Amino acid sequence: MSEIHEGVGSVYYPGIKQIVSASYSRSHGITPDICQIQMAPQTLDPSAPDYTPIEPDGYLLFQFDAKSVEVNSLGNRSTKTTQILIQGCRPDRANIRRSGSSEIWTIPIFDRRWKWKFGSFSGHWNIKKNGVIESRKERTVRQLADLCLEAMGEKKYNTKALDQLEENKKLKYRKKIRPEVHWDRIPPAQALNDLVTSLGFRVCLKWDDTVSIEKYGEGALLSTDDLMSGGFEADLPEVSNSVTVVGGITMHETIWSLEAVGLDIDGMWRPIDHLSYIPQVAGAGTWKYSQPGVFDGILASYQDIEDQKVNGVPVDKDEYRKKKEQYSLAQQTVYRCYRLMYPLGTKENETFRKKYDDIGYSMGLVVDLGNTMGEKAYDDTLDKYEKARRELFLKSEPVIPGPKKKDSRTGKFGDYKLEEFEQVLPCFKTRAELAVDSYTGKLIRKPAIAAGQYYNTNKASNTEGLGDPVQIVDGESFEVIPELGIIRFSEPMYRMVRERIEVDGKKSKPQLVVYPAKLYVQLATPLKNTVGEPARFEYREELDKKYRTTPAKLPGNLKDKPRIVPTGTDTKVIVNNEIVQAYQARFVPNKKRTELVLKDVVDNVKTEELEKQALAVIDVENLRIITKGSGSGVYTGLKKINLDGAIHQVTISRNTTGGMTTTVSRNSEVNPVVPSFDERQRRNALKEMIKERDQKIDKTQQVNPEG
């Protein structure tokens, strides 16, 4: 018969002469846990005769000697000793606490997982081409985990639990999961943690220093031997009727036609024929005869005021400042900035275009006269101008290729016609199609590309536009300003057209004049509804009825008739921005090869198995709901109970009198000093985000009137 009458616990760390008390909690994950040791003061002076260095890479030895534990056949009592050895520990900076009669040092000791933040690991696996994984790049989750553990230098590990992902018959979507991973010089422990945690598994460090991957919620029950106190947790999970995974903002890739725009002195972007500083030629505003980048007509107007200076001071200072700013904005933005206009294939409504241009010309005059926001002339014209632009966009019926919209009258699904330009803002800087960066090896979205008909200064002729061949503008020669849907080129983009000019009522010989370039850009945009909510991939899964809550039956002797309250709950939404649906419109040249026409639209729901990804997320969330047997127990002495999928935390405490207890938490974490697993995950993710941000150089350029 086993009986524990008394016992003495001790803790040892090389270099610490006297440990007063200690507390250590071991938890899931790759973050090192800390043993908080209270120690008696000792000299830190290497020249002192009693100096003992505290080892920077030492070990922790927990020991409990239980006396009168058992009686043998001869009636002699024996002593049982239990030990737990934790190697590879690192002490951190000590804290000193003084009172009137004593001084205690508190020193934290990290377990060996402090070394796991180091290392460099790369690997690109389960890469898909046209939705199919290359055989030479295919790896199971277990094989990937093994690669990570080998790179961590671990010699003994157990990843057998991951075989569930190969042979799960109950949950078919969990069978043969092949996550596409792109690890580029990251610590292998981080790669391992990111891989298994997202699939509902945990990294567990055992007392024998082996690393084991365990399924969340599956594992040993709490032991009843030597149990001092314990019980189940009172915090029951909040259960919804269903779980909905919401992905990142859906990307809609297509080709957009562009219109030349410029920034005006009132801070607004407008088509160049609506600006306040259109060059005046023979009493009419036109850009045809102004050299791009020089803009002779605007420069001449500015120089007229410059020439009228008296003793270096302009006669009309306000007019001088206005002309100077207008010329500066023309140089910086006209022919350099083009705004998304319509998806390719849109036929513009000519009637509403004329109305928009007429009001736009008036808007330019109002601004040139010095009217600003808040003044009636400006505000009234602006209201009409913005309304005309919205009408033109709506009446032109631009279609975003891919998604379908249900007609409220007929109930049939048809093309999704945009109602407002703001539905596609802010646009993305890239296309939707994925590619592997040739330098970093990371999975990236392909860059936006621009094409069209523009004047090639090297060849002294216009390009052929979207016909044969397609002329691609070098991606480094422009940038995308997402909030405005504007493509800003590093050099002026324009066309040279030969036409006759009317002078004094007579037609001149044909000569070259300037027109805006006919440009197109291929990139991705969001798709918002008219209230501004962007489209996202959604997948909803109903929770098994046996896990749902049902209202308790009301007593029958109630005096007042109770009002029936709604039963059940709405869906629980989980946002996972890693799951992104992407539409890609594909175009081919027409028979005459004069323009591009829509061939088809493909999306990545099947090729990237978005539903499977969503179900895996839902499965991990459901584990929190359906996991049974949550609780904790406090045991006398030292219990060598290992972490597994259900045992989340083991805490060893040794008090000042030598008493020792072990607290074991099942499907919970009860030590208030140690952050929860989810909190540790968030902190790690935040550290990595800050680290990655610090490694990048921000090359974003902002457009401003001063250049």
Image: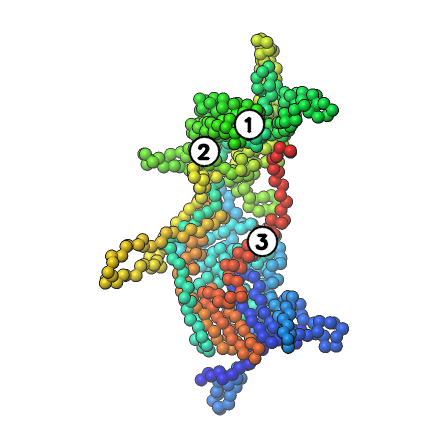
Alpha carbons under labels 1 and 3: distance apart = 50 Å
Relative depth, front residue between 128 and 21: 21
Asked if marks 3 and 2 touch (Cβ < 8 Å), the reply is: no
Relative depth, front residue between 318 and 400: 318
**Residue placed under numbered mark 2 in the picture:** 420
Alpha carbons under labels 1 and 2: distance apart = 27 Å
Q: Tell me the element at label 2.
A: loop
The mark that comes first in sequence, 1 or 2, is 1
Q: Which mark is residue 688?
A: 3
Q: Would you say 346 lies left or right of 56 here?
A: left
Alpha carbons under labels 3 and 2: distance apart = 38 Å
Q: Tell me the element at label 3.
A: helix
Using a 10 Å C-alpha cutoff, classify the residue at mark 1 as few (fewer than 14 neighbours), some (14 to 19) or many (20 or more).
some
**Residue placed under numbered mark 1 in the picture:** 371
Q: How many callouts does the rendering have?
A: 3
As displayed, is residue 416 above or below residue 37?
A: above
Which residue shows up at 45% across the image and 29% down it?
Answer: 387
As displayed, is residue 699 above or below residue 167?
A: above
The mark that comes first in sequence, 3 or 2, is 2
Q: Position of residue 162 (x, y in %)?
A: 48, 59
Q: Would you say 68 lies left or right of 58 here?
A: left
Q: Position of residue 10 (x, y in %)?
A: 58, 78
Q: Position of residue 343 (x, y in %)?
A: 48, 31
Label 1 or label 2, whichever lies nearer to me, is: 1
- Which residue is at the far bottom? 74
Q: Amino acid at mark 2?
A: Glu
Q: Amino acid at mark 1?
A: Asn
